[in-house]
Amino acid sequence: MARSMVAQDTAMATIMAMITDTTTSTNTVMATELLQLIWLASPALPVGGFSYSEALEAAIDHGHVHDEASCANWLADQLHLSQARGDMALMAQAIPAWQDLNTERLKTLSQWVHTTRETHEMRLQTEQMGRSLLDWLRIQNKATEAALKLCSELRPTYPIAMSLALSLAKAPLDQALQAYAFGWAENMTQAALKAVPLGQVSGQKILARLAQEIPETVQHAIALSDDERQAFCPMLAVMSARHETQYSRLFRS
């Protein structure tokens, strides 16, 4: 009887130790994923995002954006109409494609990005940020040589390179896209503070609104098929084209 109780206690201790080790391991993985997503969402990521306003500066110059409310509306529209239906929808498909290293699928998605940039500035922005992010990925030593080589051969654009970076975090797809969207929102808010100009409190209010709307846009992006994905945003394209010849500019787009 005593031996049986000792055996049971030993077995229970072993099981508890296994549970503890598993829990610790799981928490460590989750923490690693979270830190990687925070890193990728940071404005400090060395890809030059701070130097672009994505036509916001032209919208200000033409009177479409002039205060906190109009700026919040402009960026919210861009989030829903441009990001969610376009680049975020593409990234929702590119992230698993990178995880499987599906070359043909990635070539198709990359071609879509190149053919849907509606202005010269938009193309230059996505190509420059894509190259810079690929350079950053090379020094991180996390992506495989095969993945880095393929990304380079695709003439990296920002959505494609960012999808590779997010795939390495191994986070759930919705969380990966939320991190990307919040990084975009931070960059746009910082551009608004300089160009409108706005104060820090106004900037935080705009960022709070965008953050509240990001989960919805992420779910919309994930649900879109190839046939439903689009980059059609006429006012954004018009403002981007006008920004190319704008006399006085702070930003590259």
Image: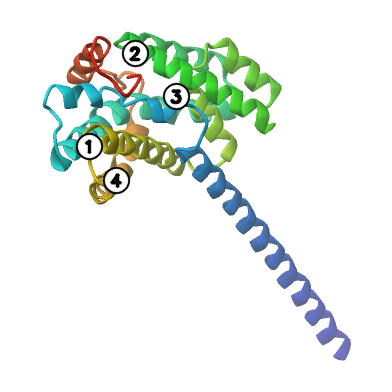
Please tell me which residue is depicted at 19% across the width and 14% down the height of the picture: 238
Q: Residues within 10 Å of mark 2 (few under 14, many from 20)?
A: many
User: How far is disc 1 from disc 4 in space, using C-alphas?
Assistant: 15 Å
Left or right: where does residue 189 sit relative to residue 124?
A: left
8 vs 184, nearest the viewer: 184
Q: On the picture, is 235 further left or further right than 94?
A: left
Task: Say if 223 sits above or below 209 in the image.
Answer: above
Instruction: Name the N-terminal-most of marks 1 and 2.
Output: 2
Tag 4 residue: 207
Looking at numbered disc 1 in the image, what kind of residue is underneath it?
Pro
Give residue 190's position: percent from left, percent from top.
Answer: 33, 38
- Earlier-in-chain disc, 3 versus 1: 3
Q: Which residue is mark 2?
A: 121
Res. 79 visible in picture: yes
- What kind of element bears circle 1? loop
Q: Is residue 42 left or right of residue 236?
A: right
Tell me the kind of residue under disc 3.
Pro
181 or 96, nearer to the observer: 181
Circle 1 or circle 2, nearest the eye: 1
Instruction: Work out which residue is located at the far front of the displayed protein and give it.
Output: 248
Q: Are marks 3 and 4 in contact (CB under 8 Å)?
A: no
